[in-house]
Amino acid sequence: MPPIYTIVIPLKNEEKNIIPLIEELEPIMDQLRKPWELICINDGSTDKTGDILSHLVQSKQYLRVLTFDRNYGQSSAFDAGFRNARGEFIITLDGDRQNDPADIPALVKAIEGHDLICGIRKKRKDSVMKRLISRSANAIRQRVCQDGISDTGCSLKIYRRSCFDKIKLYNGMHRFLPALFLIEGFSVGEVPVNHRERTQGTSNYNFFNRSFNTVADLFAVYWMRKRRLRYRIKKDKE
């Protein structure tokens, strides 16, 4: 049977997190009693991530692996997963295990009547500096994009796959997917989710690629929102 849900996880140097994450995912997804698949994107890892995925794919029938020839970034990894997904709904989460798979059923329930549901990390387990940067960035994004989303940086989301027929991603633009969905007239919502400390590996993001490099993207989304076509055709009188 074709899958109803496709889970998409970008991975870069997450050799210590892959197996524990999949072990958490399996019982959660099986409880939904719907066919599902998992797409892992190896985004230019230089550790044993690729070897582990090659081994797992031999025994996990639901697992599909996409391997980049080098590191292209999270936007490209998500886009590759979106374009190769077969499920009616796409669920995304990070490979660092800070997103809690136990929150997936709540997202599945909330997607009814919506096209995108975003997770909100209510009790973040990041450093004070990281939380301050994220809070400032979210405030600026909401003011400019007016997407009504509290925490677009949370990767734990669920999307209606058919919507991506109208969405085109560019480098760095995965952070603005809620705004892009709204521009196309889709329905967006959010639900609170758990957030956990990273216990293995190191973050692949820093102050600069979380802040300064998103300014141009922010204004690009602002331009798209202001310049989108809004015409309506009058119906002929009978």
Image (cartoon, rainbow, N blue to C red):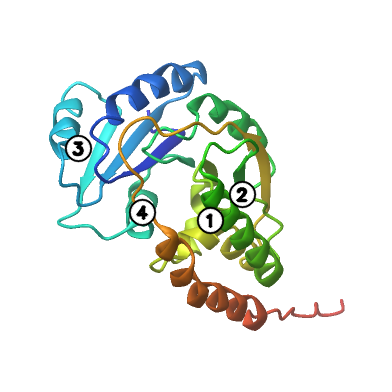
Viewport quadrant of the N terminus: top left
Give me the C-alpha separation between circle 4 and circle 3. 22 Å
Q: Position of residue 91 (x, y in %)?
A: 48, 39
Q: Which residue is disc 1 drawn over?
A: 163
Is tag 1's residue or tag 4's residue first in the polypeptide sequence?
A: 4
Residues 118 and 39: in front is: 118
The span from disc 2 to disc 3 (Cα, nearest Å) is 32 Å
- The CA span between labels 1 and 4 is 11 Å
Residue 83 shows which numbered tag?
A: 4
- The residue where tag 2 is placed is 115
From the top left corner, tell me how far across and down residue 90 is, in percent.
47, 42
Earlier-in-chain disc, 4 versus 3:
3
| Nearer the observer, 186 or 102 | 102
Q: How crowded is mark 3: few (under 14 residues within 10 Å), some or many (20 or more)?
A: many
- Mark 1: which amino acid? Cys
Binning the other alpha carbons within 10 Å of mark 4 as few (below 14), some (14 to 19) or many (20 upward) gives: few
Contact (CB < 8 A) between labels 1 and 2?
yes
What mark, if any, has residue 49 been given in the picture? 3
SS state under label 4 = helix
Tag in front: 3 or 1:
3
Of mark 2 and mark 4, the one earlier in the sequence is 4
* Nearer-N-terminus badge (2/3): 3
- Locate the C terminus by quadrant: bottom right
Height in image: 208 above or below 121? below
In this image, 19 relative to 57: left or right? right
